[in-house]
Amino acid sequence: MTTNLPSPSREKGKGKQPTTSHDEHDIELPREMNEEQRKAAEAEARKRSFERSLAGPSVGKAGLLRDQTEVNRIIAEASKGSKYYVNQVKKDQELTEKIAWYRAKRDELMKMAQVDRLEADADRILMEVEATRDLTQFIVHVDMDAFYASVEVQRDPSLKGKPFGVGQGVLTTASYEARKFGCRSGMAGFIAKKLCPEIILTKLNFDLYIAASKAVREVLIQYDENLMMASLDEGYLNITPYMSTHNMTAAQVIAQLRADVEEKTKLTISAGIAPNRMLAKICSDKNKPNGQYELPFDRATITKFMRDLPVRKIPGFGRVTERCLEGLGVETCGDIYTHRAELLVMDHWFGFRGLCKAYLGIADNNVAPGKREERKSVGVERTFRDKTDDEDILNELAEIAEELEKDLERLQYSGKTVTVKYKLHTFENKTRAKSVGKYISTSKDILPIAQELLKRELPIRIRLLGIRLSTLKDLTVQDKGIRGFLSSPGKKRNRDSTDNDAGPSRQNTPGEDVPEMVRLQAEETEIYDLTGEDEDGEFVNSDGEVNLSRRRIDTDHNRSRSRSGTPSTKVFGKRKSPSPGQHLLGPVCPICGKHLGPGTSNQDLNDHIDWCLNKDAISEASKKSPEREKKRVKQEKDRPGAGAGAAVKKKNGGGMLDWLKRG
Ligand code: TTP
Ligand code: MG
């Protein structure tokens, strides 16, 4: 069969030494190594990999000139012994186990499969995905350069040209001068000082960043009225109509747009031009700072561009995903094709179509401002130094509920699911949720539920506490018919709700750009806790929690609000795609936005959330899933009349069995 697919001319594996897999380690090593060399290489690779995970998600940031391995080593040294470090060690072990489980699963499934059949099926899917390629739209991703830092220079011009970071406990960003030393977002201030002793650390000035973002937005919207802001400092545009009405090329439009932004705001912006959002985002980083990059609009160039691209560069592929794929021999997008048979049998865990899209460079090219109904939840959370006193914790909870009420009032939402989130002093995140039969929005209604959920957990020692309300109802939309009449919460309807209240144009949730994306990444949020302990053994305040809010654009409700003294408060809100009659579909998971069905009990909801929360999922999966799953598969196998295929069917919903059967 002629597939007409872009088979890589340099297929990974071809021209490469054969590899072998090792359960103790998730990196495949060349076969001809002797045992001793292999062990040494494994230990070294393992150490490097752990140091990379300790270093956090921003290791790929533009402008980091210093040798990252050395930087990672310094970070590992500096954080050794901290709670953050201990937690990372635990997570690393869990992830290593999980990867071993994936490998075993892959090997087990591959034993039952016919590789050529699988490859043919994979090629068919690839062709289906290829058929969806659209090269007609000029999509642009724009991203401000060192955004907070550039705004800080405007506030205090003496910072210009100096190495400095924004945020004192944890850096939200670093000037390009500081990046040369390895300093960057998500890094604890004391570590930044180790890397660059002369670094200046400034306070955060959110109001200034919000004002700057608005000013930039005003320029951008001239080029596409459907501008889709993804955070304070980045957004997507479709400049196709502008190009035709002004008879300009994409490169000309973007050069003009960047000059415009700089003239009106005195801030520089970088841009990527490509046929879809995923590619545009990857491209905007190519010529940072103050540059632009256009990916030629032809299939061959795009697939070639993707072939050598590390999977980590795909928006949504975090460190966990990267390691899991690495464990299956996939480091670049080109490797996806080489390993298509194995990845197809692992479809249930890795989402084969999403991987095909990454391999082919195909993604969503819709650019449209977000809608209110896409909001998934409204929440407030706070970080503080360790709290252990029950009363103290419950007081904090009451204040958070008050604050949440104010946000709900301002944003005009009510909801049915209350989720309490807390982070233990060991950095483990926990959530407990409960759904109620009516829509609520006041502290009077929310607090008792939150208290009930939290009291069961006491005593605890925590450093973060939050309440989130989900299964939302938009109060700016008039209910229609009898259902609306019955469920009217009796609150003022604000039909004049502004755009700002509508929240981010759309959260740039990693993975959204590539639907069916691997859902494994978990470290992106956790790394913001790169606080550890400072040299005095004093716990560094998680100023870095503000980082979590950086992907939110709306001016008020989604930004962190540092309170006086140590604690900082963060308001969070997620969005989901609207679905008709959603409140009839049972509670919505506040993490993934999935409807859990009308009969879902609170216990089921909690179980789901625990599983769903990425960071917990890793530990859950490695604690329970692999062993339980192995046990379950074994039981299934042992069951009279049931073969391994039946176990696979149960787990995979039958899809994979078809392939296996046909094999
Ligand atoms: P980024 O666009 O990721 O970074 P940047 O604009 O500072 O630098 P670059 O030139 O590489 O684009 O993030 C935008 C702002 O968001 C950043 O200035 C500060 C904030 N932020 C956080 O608060 N926490 C984070 O972890 C990151 C990455 C950014
Ligand atoms: Mg930026």
Image: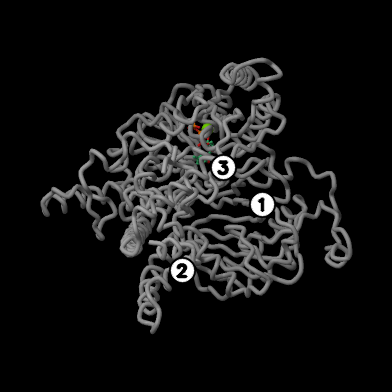
Give the residue pinned by disc 3: 550
Comes first in the chain, label 3 or label 1 = 3
Would you say 662 lies left or right of 13 here?
right
Answer above or below: position of 548 versus 303.
below
Q: In which quarter of the image is the C terminus?
A: bottom left
Instruction: Say what amino acid the circle numbered 2 marks.
Output: Lys
Q: Quadrant of the N terminus?
A: top left
Give the residue pinned by disc 2: 651
Please identify the quarter of the rendering in which residue 596 is found.
Answer: bottom right
Distance, label 3 to label 1, CA atoms, is 21 Å
Local crowd at mark 3 within 10 Å, few (<14), some, or many (≥20)? Answer: some
Q: What element carries label 3?
A: loop
Q: Position of residue 587 (x, y in %)?
A: 66, 66
Would you say 587 lies left or right of 165 here?
right
Answer above or below: position of 548 versus 346.
above
314, 491: nearer the viewer: 314
Please report the residue visible at 38 percent of the width from the left and 49 percent of the height from the top: 340
Give the residue pinned by disc 1: 577
Q: Which colour scheme is used?
A: one colour
Instruction: Say what amino acid the circle numbered 3 marks.
Output: Arg
* Label 3 C-beta lies within 8 Å of the nearest ligand 1 atom: yes
Please report the residue visible at 53 percent of the width from the left and 51 percent of the height from the top: 516
Please report the residue visible at 53 percent of the width from the left and 47 percent of the height from the top: 511
Comes first in the chain, label 3 or label 2 = 3
Answer above or below: position of 360 versus 592.
above
Answer above or below: position of 381 versus 366.
below
Q: Single out the mark in the foreground, 3 or 2.
A: 2
* Residue 375 is at least partly visible in this image: yes
Q: Are marks 3 and 1 in contact (CB under 8 Å)?
A: no
Q: What element carries label 1?
A: loop
